[in-house]
Image: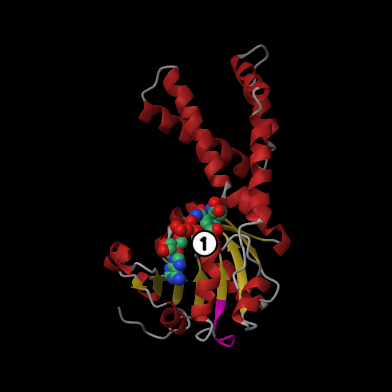
């Protein structure tokens, strides 16, 4: 568990779902190597798999910060204040750029808790970051253009990025970070339908996933509106429009819109500051 001090070193504080997905995605991109990334977790033994792949791992957050130039904060909102208290001394505004993927926590919340005017970029990726297919939203109100570009470069290696105003971060959380779960559930539902009408479960899931991939790729490749593409599928008196209308009568679009609205509202309420 040895560290070398280097501005190019990345500390990921909180090796859970998104922290590990990010670490793996960065290495998979070929632009970063495992040796320059250190992941922290309270139970460091659970990171054994990653240390075997060359990543650094420690339960010492302050030390990880000291040895890095870029610090990614990837703990749950309710774990954040405790972590910030532990790294306060180690954070150097001259040296560090902080990236927070924590939902519902503003740049101001972080600098206030740290009592330091360190540059913070908020990033909202999704779990497809592990395979370099994330839609990552970025926002900051205090980072320099250079550091914003540095963070954008980093997340561009693991998917697409878009820079947004910070006040839209909760909306971005719902649409993109939670959104991947919504699309996964709809693929799962499609596969359940496929099984009911005759396919084995694994076969149905593969067919549904590739069909969903094709739908997304069509939109991304052509820039066409979904309804334009839907019109090409729905033959008059045909079976597509019959199925589609049945889904709409059952509230398909409405359920997705309502779910996204509730997720955005909840994302804004996740962080309860401790004393
Ligand atoms: N899971 C997702 O798809 C996304 C999550 N986020 C945000 O990322 C953050 C992390 O989410 P998940 O990875 O899903 O949660 P998680 O619970 O899987 O990971 C958090 C990790 O932080 C560790 N941890 C807690 N306190 C620590 C400390 N003081 N020092 C070191 N490690 C510590 C925990 O042991 C855990 O492994 C949350 O704030 C969430 O809102 C953002 C975008 C997507
Ligand atoms: O469910 C959550 O609270 C986190 C934030 C976005 C995705 N997962």
The magenta-colored residue range is: 92-97
- Rendering coords of residue 109 (x, y %): 65, 71
Q: Residue furthest front?
A: 275
**Is the CB–ligand 1 distance for label 1 below 8 Å?**
yes
**Residue 275 against residue 268 in the figure, above or below:** below
- Judging depth in this view, the residue of 74 and 271 nearest the camera is 271
Percent from the top left, x then y, of residue 271? Answer: 61, 62
Helix, strand or loop for disc 1: loop
Colour convention? secondary structure
The x, y position of residue 208, in whole percent, is: 47, 31
Q: Position of residue 60 (x, y in %)?
A: 39, 78
Q: Residues within 10 Å of mark 1 (few under 14, many from 20)?
A: some
Residue 133 in sight:
no
Identify the image quadrant of residue 136.
bottom right
**Magenta includes 106?**
no
Direction top: furthest residue: 237
In the rendered image, which residue does mark 1 sit on? 76
> Which quadrant of the rendered structure holds the N terminus?
bottom left
Write the residue at 59% across / 70% down.
Answer: 274
Q: Residue at x 67, y 21 (%)?
A: 249
Left or right: residue 160 compared with residue 7: right
Residue 181 falls left or right of residue 67: right
Give the main secondary structure of the magenta stretch. loop
- At a point 52% along the width and 62% down the height, the residue shown is 76
Q: Residue at x 60, y 73 (%)?
A: 275
């Amino acid at each position: 568990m040895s560290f070398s001090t280097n501005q190019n070193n990345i500390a990921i504080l909180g090796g859970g779902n998104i922290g590990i997905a990010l670490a793996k995605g960065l290495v998979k991109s070929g632009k970063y190597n495992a040796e320059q990334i250190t992941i922290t977790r309270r139970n460091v033994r659970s990171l054994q798999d990653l240390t075997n792949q060359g990543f650094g791992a420690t339960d010492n957050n302050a030390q990880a910060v000291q040895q890095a130039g870029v610090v990614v904060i990837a703990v749950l909102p309710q774990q954040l204040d405790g972590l910030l208290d532990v790294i306060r001394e180690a954070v150097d505004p001259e040296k560090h750029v902080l990236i927070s993927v924590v939902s519902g926590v503003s740049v101001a919340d972080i600098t206030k808790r740290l009592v330091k005017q360190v540059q913070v970029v908020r990033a909202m990726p999704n779990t497809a970051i592990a395979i370099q297919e994330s839609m990552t939203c970025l926002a900051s109100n205090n980072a320099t253009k250079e550091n914003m570009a540095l963070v954008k470069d980093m997340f561009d290696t693991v998917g697409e990025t878009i820079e947004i105003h910070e006040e839209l971060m909760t909306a971005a959380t719902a649409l993109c970070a939670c959104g991947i779960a919504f699309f996964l559930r709809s693929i799962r539902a499609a596969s359940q339908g496929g099984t009911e009408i005759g396919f084995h479960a694994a076969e149905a899931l593969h067919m549904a996933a590739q069909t969903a991939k094709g739908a997304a790729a069509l939109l991304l490749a052509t820039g066409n509106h979904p309804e334009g593409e839907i019109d090409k599928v729905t033959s008059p008196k045909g079976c597509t429009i019959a199925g589609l209308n049945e889904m709409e009568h059952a509230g398909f679009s409405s359920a997705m819109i309502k779910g996204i609205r509730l997720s955005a509202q909840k994302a804004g309420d996740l962080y309860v500051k401790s004393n």
